[in-house]
Image (cartoon, helix red, strand yellow):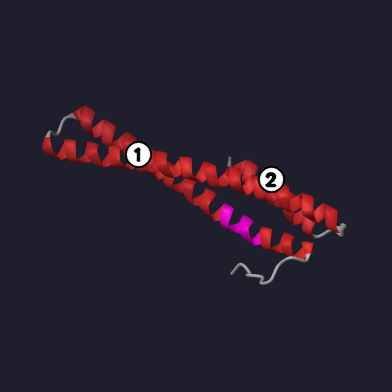
């Protein structure tokens, strides 16, 4: 998913450096909005999975605190590692989609329909 996000972002950035007619920008805006919707759905799913794994990890830590057995420690370690990986992945998705919002503003500027432009910092 991360590669897909990067590829689309590179495609849009390249298109923004070129000159095209209004019809092209209209089509690109529709395509980009569709991709943003896909990524927003992906973000939601990953948020739900991350939260579920985090709750299970906390539950396993509580279980280990109450009944310290080796299997409980192994489960807690595994789930905490998964939560860490999911958090990194979700962070990358979240920031990528937010960058796409700025690209959408630049596409709208090329279309001539933007009223304000917010720059990335």
> What secondary structure is the magenta-colored segment mainly?
helix
User: Residue at left 87%, top 57%?
Assistant: 21
Upstream in sequence: badge 1 or badge 2: 2
In this view, the residue in front, 17 or 112, is: 112
Residue 105 appears in which quarter of the rendering?
Answer: bottom right
Examine the rendered structure and indicate whether residue 90 appears above or below residue 113.
above
Q: Is residue 108 magenta?
A: no
Comparing marks 1 and 2, which lies closer to the viewer?
A: 1
* Magenta stretch contains residue 98: yes
The image quadrant of residue 47 is top left
Q: Which mark is residue 7?
A: 2
Coordinates of residue 14 in the picture (x, y in percent): 78, 54
Give the labeled residue for mark 1.
52
> Going by the image, does 25 lie left or right of 7?
right
Work out which quarter of the rendered image holds the N terminus and state it: top right
Number of callouts in the render?
2
**The magenta segment:** 97-102
Q: Position of residue 118 (x, y in %)?
A: 63, 70
Q: Is residue 69 left or right of residue 56?
A: left
- CA distance for labels 1 and 2: 29 Å
| Residue 26 sits above or below residue 117 on the image | above
């Amino acid at each position: 998913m991360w590669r897909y996000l990067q590829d689309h972002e590179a495609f849009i950035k390249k298109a923004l450096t070129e000159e095209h007619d209004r019809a092209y920008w209209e089509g690109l805006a529709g395509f980009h909005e569709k991709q943003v919707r896909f990524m927003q759905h992906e973000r939601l799913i990953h948020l739900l999975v991350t939260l579920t794994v985090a709750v299970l990890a906390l539950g396993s830590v509580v279980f280990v605190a109450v009944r310290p057995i080796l299997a409980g420690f192994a489960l807690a370690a595994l789930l905490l590692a998964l939560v860490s990986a999911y958090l990194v992945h979700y962070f990358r998705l979240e920031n990528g989609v937010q960058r796409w919002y700025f690209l959408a503003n630049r596409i709208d500027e090329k279309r001539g329909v933007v009223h304000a432009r917010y720059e990335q910092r």
